[in-house]
Amino acid sequence: MTIKTEQLSSTAFSSATYDDENKDLSMTFVNGGTYIHRNVPQELFDGLVAAGSPGKYWHSNIKDQY
């Protein structure tokens, strides 16, 4: 099991944590709140942390889908 946490350059999110065993993606908002998405493919986490705008990427590819 590997759990990765990446700091995000975003006005909405401060970090994203991915658990590759359970495929859980935890998004931490700048206000301190956390939202967990289940069954998220590794590729989407990788795309999120590489995105120029993590908030837009999250909204387009993850939110309401996982």
Image: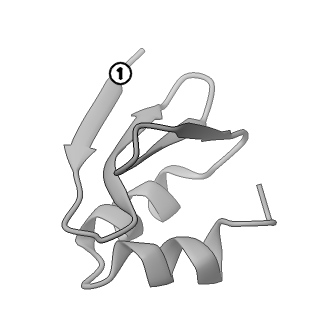
Q: Which residue is mark 1?
A: 2
Q: Where is residue 35 drawn, in percent x and y?
A: 61, 41
State the image coordinates of residue 2 (x, y, percent, origin top left).
35, 21
Q: Is 51 positioned to the left or the right of 63 in the image? A: left
Q: Secondary structure at mark 1?
A: loop
Q: Residue at x 65, y 66 (%)?
A: 62
Write the residue at 23% across / 45% down. Answer: 6
How far from the left and from the top, in percent, is residue 39?
A: 72, 42
In this orientation, which residue lies closer to the viewer: 30 or 16? Answer: 30
At label 1, the amino acid type is: Thr
Q: Is residue 29 above or below residue 49?
A: above
Q: Quadrant of residue 12?
A: bottom left
Write the residue at 53% across / 37% down. Answer: 34
Looking at the rendering, in which quadrant would you find the C terminus?
bottom right
- In the rendered view, tell whether residue 50 sits above or below residue 22: below
- Local crowd size for mark 1, using a 10 Å CA cut-off: few (<14), some (14–19), many (≥20): few
Image quarter in which the N terminus is found: top left
Answer left or right for 33 relative to 38. Answer: left
Residue 58, placed above or below residue 39: below
Compared across the picture, whether 58 is left or right of 3 comes to right
Quarter occupied by residue 28:
top left
